[in-house]
Amino acid sequence: MNKIKEQKQQKYGYSPISDEEVFGIAKEYAAQHYGRFDFVVRKAEGAWLYDIEGNKYLDCLAAYSAANQGHHHPKIVNAIVDALRGNYASVLSNMVYTDVMALFSKKLATLLPQLGPRFGNQGNKVLPKNGGVESVETAIKAIRFYGFKQKGIPDGKQEIIVFDNNFHGRMITVISFSTTEKYKKGFGPLTPGFISVEYGNLKAVENAVNENTAGILVEPMQGEGGMYQPPEGFLKGLREISDENDLLLVFDEIQVGLGRTGKMFCFEYENVIPDGIILGKAISGGLLPLSAFVSNSEIMDMVFTPGSDGSTFGGYPLACVAGIAALDVIINEDLPARAAKMGEILKSRIMKIAEHSAHIKEVRGRGLFIGIEVNNGNAMEYCQKLLKLGVLANDSHGHTIRISPPLIINEEQIDYLIERLEKVLLD
Ligand SMILES: Cc1ncc(COP(=O)(O)O)c(C=O)c1O
């Protein structure tokens, strides 16, 4: 290896091993559970990713919304480094209190409006976990327990209404109610207790409700399911059905919350307040695993008492430090407003491309959560071409190119992206 190349490699990344070596080692020793791009990222900063030679790629995936604040946001990095250097970062067990756990909970609980207002106005409470799917399971526990304790549904008979093409993560209970065959085939026995109905179809929801229904779990916009926005009035209708039938209504905003769609929370578009919400990804600025289930204090206190739940790392100090800093960045930099503004510019320019493109079936989305559905149903083909031109994007549900860059993206970066989208979509 020549000297200059070696120095470059040292500058960008953890080790000087070549991309070919990375592919070889990863293929030999790492599970192949992702169809990865042939792309080794050595450095990530703001909206840019860098390969070993320092070539730049615009990140239009943002780790499925985990990097909303941009990669390595200095305020979040500094908070984490301070905690490590100050010896208040390590996991301590949840048998003791920490100031950062208390302060993170307060920040998140008070960022949200009063959830489940029909249960009273005594504030929200937060139950922190690690990856998003863990908080989805926490929410499922809450809905089931509510059905058992409050509605008198016999334990084991509780049912939850979910939606076709849902995506809530990859653990057994959650894949059990996925309608995507490849997510669950061969992984049985699956967890019962879920009824899936068509997304956006309120009549189907009404028909699915019975005496064992404890709640509804829904994404206010579907991310992995193809970047779909439900018909207007859908969330309001779910609220009404939940109120009429005493169901807990929980929104999974892991991908679309925290500014992504141009509002702090996607549910604000319909002005509908859920009983519980699940957040993850950007909640720690893409630097550490952190997620949370948040609900009205009355529900949280009814369901979760000492011994009924737990997690070694859930709510540990370092994650909470990152969480506080990450939420501060979203609030102080007004990232929801930025996503709305930049999203409008980006979407209107993509719509212009669509007017002249033979490849595009539909452009949809809100804020910086934009889907470009392609006519041939093979979005990955376009994503591979984009990568060669210096843009990282992936598909949603096979047929749609997902454009969801960090919310700090600027107009110059939008120009860069549009130039490349034109190249692959106007040929
Ligand atoms: C809506 C939604 N829920 C849950 C999850 C699962 O989160 P995690 O991958 O952190 O477990 C995801 C991940 O993409 C998601 O988009």
Image (cartoon, rainbow, N blue to C red):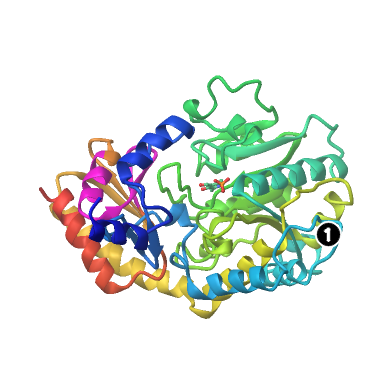
Percent across and percent down for residue 378 are 27, 36
Q: Is residue 56 left or right of residue 22?
A: left
Residue under label 1, please give it: 298
**Residue sitting at x 42%, y 48%:** 228
User: Dot 1 surroundings within 10 Å: few (below 14), some, or many (20 or more)?
Assistant: some
Q: Which residues are magenta?
A: 381-402
| Residue 216 colored in magenta in the image | no
Name the one closer to the observer, 321 or 152.
321
Q: Quadrant of residue 272?
A: bottom right
| Residue 394 colored in magenta in the image | yes
Name the one closer to the observer, 109 or 81.
81
On the question of residue 38 being in view, the answer is: no
**Residue sitting at x 53%, y 64%:** 285
How many marks on residues?
Answer: 1
Percent across and percent down for residue 300 are 80, 56
Q: Quadrant of residue 103?
A: bottom right
Name the one closer to the observer, 22 or 118.
22
